[in-house]
Image (spheres, rainbow, N blue to C red):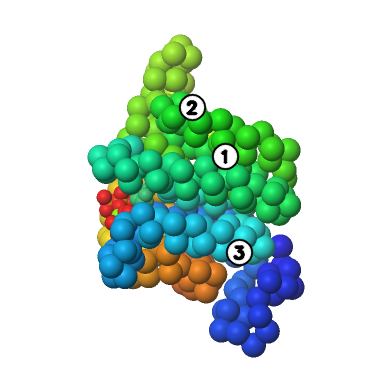
Amino acid sequence: MSLEQLLTSIPQGSPDEALARQVNFEQLPAHVAIIMDGNGRWAAQRHLPRVEGHRAGIDSVRDVVETSARLGIDVLTLYAFSIENWKRPPAEVNTLMLLLKRYIRLELDAIHGNNIKFRVIGRSEELAPDVQDELEVGIRHTAENTGMLFNIALNYGGRAEIVDAARRAIASGIAPEALDERRFSDLLYTAGQPDPDLLIRTSGEMRVSNFLLWQIAYSEIWVTERLWPDFRRRDLLEAVLAYQKRDRRYGGIKPSRVVAGAK
Ligand code: IPE
Ligand code: IPE
Ligand code: MG
């Protein structure tokens, strides 16, 4: 994409425009992954039930998906529900699933219209049948799209993903010596996708919470205090600008500006 394309959606003279103009479109992260956290705290600050934070977080999802597609990000992965999140009260889990279904129903046309390809990563076969059906509609409807790949991580765990890949490797009968890092990557849910160049976490927590453990080996991590329901285009642009100032060395000694690994 281009600056011009991004600017068509940004009010002239706004702070977002100034940020957009600083972005180097030759050094975009190919894959951005986001741990969307802080919905509960956002609601608590307003003396609202936790689920109101989840509801408000949908606006952030919409904004970030659209901005990422306009920027020209190849892959966006959003962490929406972890395997560990089943520990939460059933009413909260039910509302999260309801909001997910509603999001797909309401946003599918816009997602499709932006040429975005929708995918799910995680043990989606363990989700309720009505949720699976809704996800399937989204996946099928956008399967032929050629723009940004939008992965939503649902019932996702990084360790579970590695175990699933190991199971697949064993089931395929591959000889142990034939298994290497590249082949193993092809057994993960993200087979064929570039590893995240940029990992964003909101709400200030300094942990990865079982997200994309294999894939983030050399990701640049950017943490913001912003709570997820307050996260908007400007925050994403700030993250991209911070990323573009990083030196990625991949264990070597020559600092290479973000070009390496990204497009
Ligand atoms: C993130 O917000 C949403 C999910 C994990 C589903 P939280 O619900 O974790 O919000 P906090 O961390 O309690 O503030
Ligand atoms: C991470 O947030 C999971 C998602 C964003 C879906 P959590 O709120 O579940 O993570 P912890 O419990 O603070 O590590
Ligand atoms: Mg949390």
Nearest to N terminus: mark 1 or mark 2: 1
Residue 58 x, y percent position in the rendering: 49, 57
Kindly report the distance in space between the C-alpha atoms of the residues bearing marks 3 and 2: 31 Å
Question: Which residue is at a point 48% across and 37% down the rendered structure image?
Answer: 121
Label 3 crowd (10 A; few <14 / some 14-19 / many >=20): many
Kind of residue at disc 2: Pro
Viewer-nearest residue: 160 or 9: 9
Q: Kindly identify which residue carries mark 1.
A: 119
Question: As drawn, is 204 to the left or to the right of 126?
Answer: left
Res 249 visible: no
Residue 102 visible at all: yes
Q: In the drawing, what numbered circle is on residue 129?
A: 2
SS at badge 1? strand
Residue highlighted by disc 3: 67
Looking at the rendered structure, the secondary structure element under dot 2 is: helix
- Rounded to the nearest angstrom, the CA distance separating label 1 from label 3 is 18 Å
